[in-house]
Image: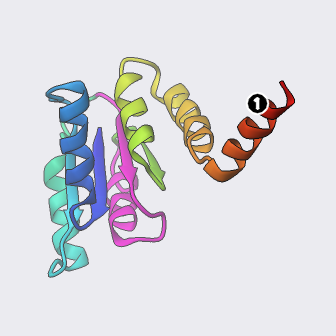
Amino acid sequence: MLILSHGALAEGYHQTMKMILGEEPDITYCALEEDDSSEDLGKKIHTCIHWQNSMPLLVLADIYSGSPCRSAITQLFSSSKKSYLIAGISLPLVMEAYLQRNGELSQIVDNLISVAKENVINVNELLLKTKQNMEDE
């Protein structure tokens, strides 16, 4: 699994995963730093991917239209490596991806899209409903 982002976000996800789940050897991250060019980022991504490994690769990027995602698209889809790329990640999504890592990757991707949708919560609305339910009892 490869986490891509602008700045320190990918590293933050990686460090947080280690804190919550312990050392995660099959996860790496790569980031577009302020002074990096698109070419620099492409080289970083290329270095992070185990191209000789026949295992499919799950890549999680922060923003669909951002340079990290576009660089991943260029790197991955110009190769024969089986890969899946999801953009618009969050910590719950990254953690879920890791927890499901031993499953069929295409099914994991479908599950992750559902998880992402379920983890965006209007807390004000939820609290209001909870309050109303408590008052009705």
The x and y percentages for residue 129 are 76, 40
Residue 21 vertical position relative to residue 60 in the rendered view, above or below: above
Q: Quadrant of the C terminus?
A: top right
Q: Tell me which colouring the rendered structure shows.
A: rainbow
Quarter of the image holding residue 46? Answer: bottom left
Residue 11 vertical position relative to residue 74 in the rendered view, above or below: above
Residue at (50%, 28%) from the top-left corner? 108
Residue at (38%, 55%) from the top-left corner? 61
Residue 10 vertical position relative to residue 101 in the rendered view, above or below: below
Stretch in magenta: 55-80
Q: Is residue 124 visible?
A: yes
The x and y percentages for residue 123 are 62, 48
For residue 65: magenta? Answer: yes
The x and y percentages for residue 33 are 18, 72
Q: Is residue 53 visible?
A: no
Label 1 crowding class (10 Å Cα cut-off): few <14, some 14-19, many 20+? few
Judge left or right: residue 42 versus residue 104. left
Residue 66 vertical position relative to residue 58 in the rendered view, above or below: below
Q: Quadrant of the N terminus?
A: top left
Depth check: give the residue in front, 29 or 129: 129
The x and y percentages for residue 8 are 21, 62
Mark 1 belongs to which amino acid? Answer: Met
Depth check: give the residue in front, 104 or 118: 118
Q: Residue furthest top?
A: 102
Residue at (39%, 67%) from the top-left corner? 70
Residue at (23%, 41%) from the top-left corner? 16
Q: Which residue is mark 1?
A: 134
Q: Tell me the element at label 1.
A: helix
Depth check: give the residue in front, 82 or 4: 4
State the count of labels.
1
